Image: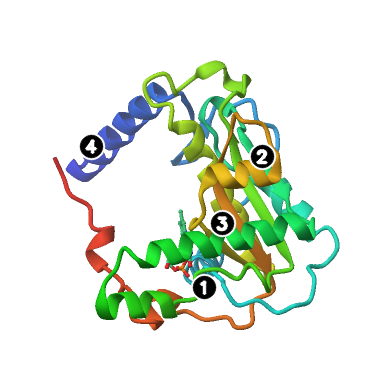
Amino acid sequence: MTQKQHNDLYAGLASVVALAARGCRVEKSGSTWNRRIMLPNTSPSPTFDRAFRADLEQLFAWRRDVRRFRCEPLEANALDELVALTAYAPSVGYSQPSRFVRVRDAHRRERIIAEYERANADAATAYAGERRATYIGLKLAGLREAPEHVAVFVDEATARGEGLGRRLMPEMLAYSTVLAVHTLWLAARARGIGVGWVSIVDPGAIVAILDVPRAWQLVAYLCVGYPQEEHLDRELARAGWEERDRSATAIIER
Ligand SMILES: Cc1cc2nc3c(=O)[nH]c(=O)nc-3n(C[C@H](O)[C@H](O)[C@H](O)COP(=O)(O)O)c2cc1C
């Protein structure tokens, strides 16, 4: 046996031992080792190839927070499909705490728009001078134009999951709902549907206007509809409010 064959054999055996320790079954076929994850899953897993990954990156890059909507309604069932897809989102302890409210009533919508306008005018007072003028010029919601309003709540009283994973970090329940929103957001973009997240509202006011259970906390108020424009640059960067921070994706080590 040459030194290289010896090294290959040793490396192969070491990886078999490591994989077995992680619960993988390792089989030899011909001269290659195959590993199989021992999970009770019968369906074959799909292959996400390079082309798919490139498309997925495009989806991430082209998702926008949309405030400018075309007025036509969404296709029938589009919203139901988007909400159904959020079932794939992870949730702490599999608690699935997200609650979606489609706001159709014109009177309730008007009250929510009024609440946004009040909160936004109040927020402007936190800035001074040129910054305040820039803030006032920003379009921070498409509540009047969007054909759909969807309020997303986290149900703090859910019994599902029986508390798993949130004893020391109760906020994990709300984080689970954030992930459901993100799933909806990406799925919408993949269908050419725009989503805008509005957080310039008093959450208690939204709970009251929509008359939902007190244990439901507002996580996101979403405007949904077809966007007037698809664009790569972010609206707030365009408006000169905030630029991209490349260091925000840096990883540090400890
Ligand atoms: C939790 C959260 C709350 C947000 N609230 C608002 C909001 O009230 N108004 C607004 O115009 N954009 C809001 N946004 C959108 C961000 O401003 C937007 O994501 C950011 O400017 C980057 O742009 P992009 O989403 O198009 O990449 C919110 C986004 C998140 C994640």
Q: Are marks 2 and 1 in contact (CB under 8 Å)?
A: no
Residue 234 visible in the displayed image: no
Amino acid carrying label 3: it is Phe
Residue depicted at x 29% and y 76%:
131
Q: Quadrant of residue 107?
A: bottom right
Tell me the CA gap for discs 1 and 4: 50 Å
Q: Position of residue 125 (x, y in %)?
A: 34, 66
Amino acid carrying label 1: it is Trp
Which of the two labelled residues, at mark 3 and mark 1, occupies the earlier sequence position? 3
Mark 4 is surrounded, within 10 Å at the Cα level, by few (under 14), some (14 to 19) or many (20 or more) other residues, namely: few
In the foreground, 30 or 246: 246
Which of the two labelled residues, at mark 3 and mark 4, occupies the earlier sequence position? 4
Q: Are marks 2 and 3 in contact (CB under 8 Å)?
A: no
Q: Which quadrant, please, contains the C terminus? A: top left
Which of the two labelled residues, at mark 2 and mark 1, occupies the earlier sequence position? 1
Tell me the CA gap for discs 3 and 1: 20 Å
Mark 3 is surrounded, within 10 Å at the Cα level, by few (under 14), some (14 to 19) or many (20 or more) other residues, namely: few
In the picture of the structure, the residue carrying the numbered disc 2 is 99
- Describe residue 91's horizontal placement relative to residue 8 as left or right: right
In the picture of the structure, the residue carrying the numbered disc 4 is 6
Mark 1 is surrounded, within 10 Å at the Cα level, by few (under 14), some (14 to 19) or many (20 or more) other residues, namely: some
Q: Position of residue 105 (x, y in %)?
A: 79, 56
Tell me the CA gap for discs 2 and 4: 59 Å
Amino acid carrying label 2: it is Arg
Disc 2 beta carbon < 8 A from ligand 1?
no
Amino acid carrying label 4: it is His
Foreground disc of the pair 1, 4 = 1
In the picture of the structure, the residue carrying the numbered disc 1 is 62
